[in-house]
Image (cartoon, rainbow, N blue to C red):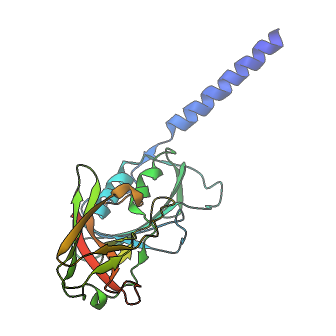
Amino acid sequence: MKRRVVYVFIAIISVTLFFLYKTSLKVTDVFEGTDEMTLNKVVGRTQIMSNPTTYFAFEDEEANEIMDILKKIKYRAQPDEETAKGWKYTFYIEFKDEKGNKMVMNIQIMDDAAYVNDQRYSIKSNESIKFLKFFSGMQKSTIEQELLNVLEGVSLKAKYDSNNERILLTLQNNSSETIYYGERIILEKKQEDKWYEVTFSGDVSFNDILNYLLPLNEEERNFPINIWIPVTKGEYRIIKEVSNQERMKEMYYLSAGFTIRD
């Protein structure tokens, strides 16, 4: 009986010491010295995507939002006990002072660990998931600008309904010909003056239906924004293919832009 009491006592002491060790780890300000500097660049990469070599350059509101999240994380220094593998999020951050001097930070985050300029830290395991919305696995648009909206008399209009989180589309045919089109649409986002296609959030498919729109008519459709991977604030456009031939041998691209502010 005494031996059992001793074992229980030792176990309690061990748990208590471990708890005290974990809670006594000092929270480190990894961004010390950057408050007086200007945020010059934020580039991110994540291996959640199908193509882990794709990099994203974040600017303005997105870059500042990422920095706000990174600064709120509680970084507790830990010995480098293991090699970093399978990092979900990697950030390259560049600051500049008034004299143009640069300060560079590399931050890698996975689950309950983080590396800041190769120094290992422990963090709460649910912190990094907040970055998911910034990475949508977008690929650069393959549609050339000069190929858009060249079918005379036919146009596409788009509007984002923030209350219902839907994209409202209006296809207008002010030509003298019947227009043919399918169900498929493409959502693209503008970043650094370039357009990137936004991927769908799941197994999304469009019905293989041939629709038509008579001359001097219009048709309205709406699509929930959640069929795409979570989008952030920014400039977007919808791309849709149409044809003035029933067999759709010659295709034309229509585009309509809109902005998400919330």
Is 118 located above or below residue 71 in the figure?
Answer: below
Q: Position of residue 261 (x, y in %)?
A: 21, 59
Query: Where residue 2 sits: x, y (%)?
Result: 81, 9
Q: Image quadrant of residue 57? A: bottom left
Q: Is residue 237 above or below residue 123?
A: below
Which of the pair 129/30 is nearer the observer? 129
* Closest to the observer, 39 or 147: 147
Answer with the quarter of the image where residue 248 lies: bottom left
What quarter of the picture does the N terminus occupy? top right
Q: Quadrant of residue 155?
A: bottom left
Specify whether residue 193 is in view. Answer: no
Residue drawn at point x = 39 percent, y = 80 percent: 141
The answer to whether 116 appears left or right of 94 in the picture is right
Q: On the rendered image, what quadrant is the C terminus found in?
A: bottom left
Residue 150 lies, in percent from the top left, at: 24, 89
Closer to the camera in the image, 181 or 123: 181
User: Which residue is at a point 44% across and 44% down the rendered structure image?
Assistant: 27
Residue 76 image point, x, y percent: 49, 47
Q: Residue at x 49, y 44 (%)?
A: 124
